[in-house]
Image: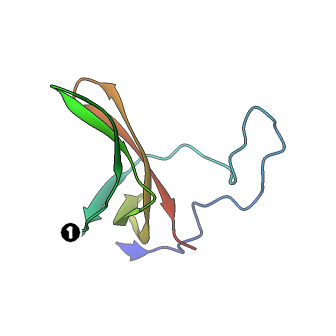
Amino acid sequence: MTHSDPNQYAGNEESTDVANRRRALRRQMKGSVHLKVDAQEIMGEADNLSRSGILFFTEGDLHVELEIESGGEVMKKTGRLVRCERIHDAKRGWAVEFDA
């Protein structure tokens, strides 16, 4: 495996489409991702509570390290977790914003 350029998969143009306000272009990708979360403490304020969970808000970031493998190349990045969404049953979608 070789180490690829960290900017290889990142778009550098802004979208002008009003319906899509993403800051960088996206492209489909297949490969594996390993996400590491160091022990961190994040303080927040509760919004609502039920028997099955809690919703709370925080101004803190959850910092992560990523190793992304695709096509025999490995890219290592750091960033912050910006979204987690349950897709179906145990399947989740995770979004990480890379550090500059």
State left or right for residue 76 relative to residue 90.
Answer: right
What's the residue at 36%, 48% (across, down)? 45
Question: Residue 50: which quarter of the image?
Answer: top left
Name which residue lies at 43% across and 62% down: 80
Horizontal and vertical percent position of residue 57: 40, 47
Q: State the residue in front, 21 or 72.
A: 21
For image coordinates 25% across by 65% down, the residue present is 41
Residue placed furthest toward the right: 16
In-image side of 43 versus 4 (left or right) = left
Q: Secondary structure at mark 1?
A: loop
Residue 22: horizontal and vertical position, in percent? 68, 46
User: Residue 66 at what x, y percent from top left?
Assistant: 36, 65
Question: How many marks do you count on the picture?
Answer: 1
Give amino acid for label 1.
Answer: Ala
Q: Residue furthest left?
A: 51
**Which quadrant would residue 9 be assigned to in this image?**
bottom right
Question: 52 or 78, which is in the foreground?
Answer: 52
Q: Position of residue 8 (x, y in %)?
A: 59, 66
Q: From the image, which quarter does the C terminus lie in?
A: bottom right
Q: Identify residue for label 1.
A: 39
Seen at 84% across and 44% down, the residue is 16
Colour scheme of the picture: rainbow
Residue nearest the observer in this picture, 34 or 22: 22
